[in-house]
Image (tube, rainbow, N blue to C red):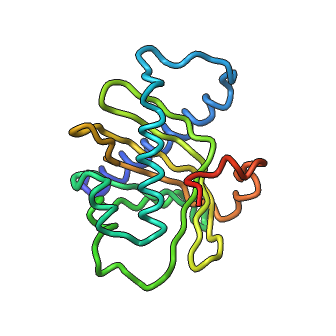
Amino acid sequence: MSPETSLRTNMIRCVNGIAVLSCLSACTPASSPAPPGHQSGEEAAVLAAMDRYMTAISANDLQAMAALQTPEGMTYRAAVTESGNMDIVPHPNSYWIDPARDDGRTYRERYWSPTVLIRGDIAVVWAPYEFWIDGETTHCGVDVFDFIKSDGQWLVSNSMWTVEPDACDELRPEDASMIRPRD
C-alpha cells in the first residue's frame, strides 16, 4: 500500500470513528457523568483558548493563530463529494498561517454547544459550527479540536471538521446566546 493510500485509509478510519462517537454521544443521556478523570475545572480555560483561536481565524490574524497552535499539528477537512464519497484533505497547522494563503477575503467562524473532555494536559472540544466568507454563510459542520497544555497555556494541537453546506438549519442552536466566541 502506498503511503498516500495508507494516509487516506487512516484518515477515513478517523472520520468514521468520529461519526460513530457522534452517534453514540447522541444516544447518551444528557445527565450522564463525565468520564473518569475529567477535569471540569479546566473547561473554561480550554473554551477560552478555543474562543481565542476562532477570533484569530475571524480576524485573519496569522501571528495570533501561530501563537495559539502547535506547529507540528495536523488538520483534516472532511466533505462529502457530489458522488457521495468522503473527501478528506490533510494539512499541517503551518498551512493555515502561511501569508501566501491570504486571499483578501473576510472569514468568520462561530461554534456552540461544545462538548469538552479533559484529562491531564490533553483536551478535546467537539462542537457544531458555522463558517462565513465575506459575510455569507458557506457551510456548517462539526469541529473537533485537540488541545495540549504547554507552559500553562492550552494550544490547538490537531483539528478536523466536516463541511456540510446543507446542514446549517439542522445544526444551528435555537438560542443564539449559545454561540461562541461572542462578538
Left or right: where 37 falls relative to 134: left
- For residue 164, what is the image quadrant? bottom right
Q: Quadrant of the C terminus?
A: bottom right
Count of picture labels = 0
- For residue 101, what is the image quadrant? bottom left
Against 107, residue 172 (above or below) is above
- For residue 138, what is the image quadrant? bottom right
| x, y percent for residue 158 | 35, 48
Against 79, residue 29 (above or below) is above
Against 122, residue 109 (above or below) is below
| Residue at image coords 76%, 57% | 169
| x, y percent for residue 102 | 37, 81
| Residue at image coords 42%, 42% | 14
| Residue at image coords 36%, 59% | 90
Left or right: where 129 falls relative to 151: right
| x, y percent for residue 68 | 32, 54
In the image shown, does 137 or 106 lie closer to the viewer?
Answer: 106
| x, y percent for residue 50 | 45, 48
Q: Residue furthest bottom?
A: 104
| Residue at image coords 47%, 58% | 54
